[in-house]
Structures are given as structure tokens and as C-alpha cells.
Amino acid sequence: MGVVEILIMLAIGAVAGWLAGNLIRGGGFGLVGNIIVGLIGSVIGTFVGGMVSGALNLNIPGIVGAIIWATIGAVLLLFIISLFKRV
């Protein structure tokens, strides 16, 4: 994995984390927090996206698809965390 791929992965993570933070909490988490939430969300989103894409024959290619699935995964992550914080 080269430097360009790592930078793209970090940028996608930052955008996904920022979007998820705005959707769930009403604000972002700062650059580092957004990247962490987005990267973990991209792992979750890739898993969920693989299941949904296979079942619905839905394929969103490229960076836009990566941002969409990473954001969905980050929203799921923040939702799950919010369930535990309320207890």
C-alpha cells in the first residue's frame, strides 16, 4: 500500500466520520476523531455493504461508493455506541 492509497483512505475516513458525526450527534469529532470513526465505520460499512450488495445486486463503485458505505458503517458505529452510553 503506497502513500497515495493511505492518504485516500484517511480522506475517506475523515469525510465519513464527519458526515456520521453530523447525522448522529449534530457535530463532528475533530479531524483525528473523524478519521478514527470513519476508518472503523468503513470496516463495518464494507461488511454490511457486502451483504446488502449481494442480496440486492447493488454496486456503488469508486470513491463515492466508499464514502457512502463508510458513512453508513460510521453511523451504525455511533448508534451502537450511543446505546451503551445511555445504559
Image (spheres, rainbow, N blue to C red):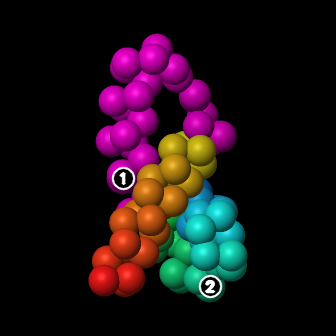
Find residue 26 and report its image quarter. bottom right
Prevailing secondary structure of the magenta residues:
helix
**What separation in Å lies between label 2 and label 1 (alpha carbons)?**
20 Å
Please give the name of the residue rendered at 55% of the width and 54% of the height, measured from the top-left corner. 71
Dot 1: few (<14), some (14–19), or many (≥20) neighbours within 10 Å?
A: some
Q: Earlier in the sequence, mark 2 or mark 1?
A: 2
Check the image and name the residue furthest to the front. Answer: 87
Which amino acid type is shown beneath numbered disc 1? Answer: Val
Q: Is 76 placed left or right of 31 in the picture? A: left
Is residue 39 shown to the viewer in this render?
Answer: no
Q: Amino acid at mark 2?
A: Gly
74 inside magenta stretch: no
Q: Residue at x 42, y 75 (%)?
A: 82
Residue plotted at (59% across, 37% down): 65
Which one is in front, 17 or 2? 17
Residue 21: x and y in percent read 61, 71
Horizontal and vertical percent for residue 5?
Answer: 50, 53
Image vertical order of residue 10 relative to residue 60, above or below: below
What are the residue bounds of the magenta stretch? 40-65
Q: Secondary structure at mark 2?
A: helix
- On residue 43, the disc is 1
Question: For numbered disc 1, what is the local secondary structure?
Answer: helix
- Compared to residue 86, the image places residue 76 above or below, namely above
Q: Which mark is residue 30?
A: 2
Where's residue 70, x and y in %? 51, 51
Front-most of residues 41 and 24: 24
* Quarter of image, res 39: bottom left
Location of the C terminus (image quadrant): bottom left
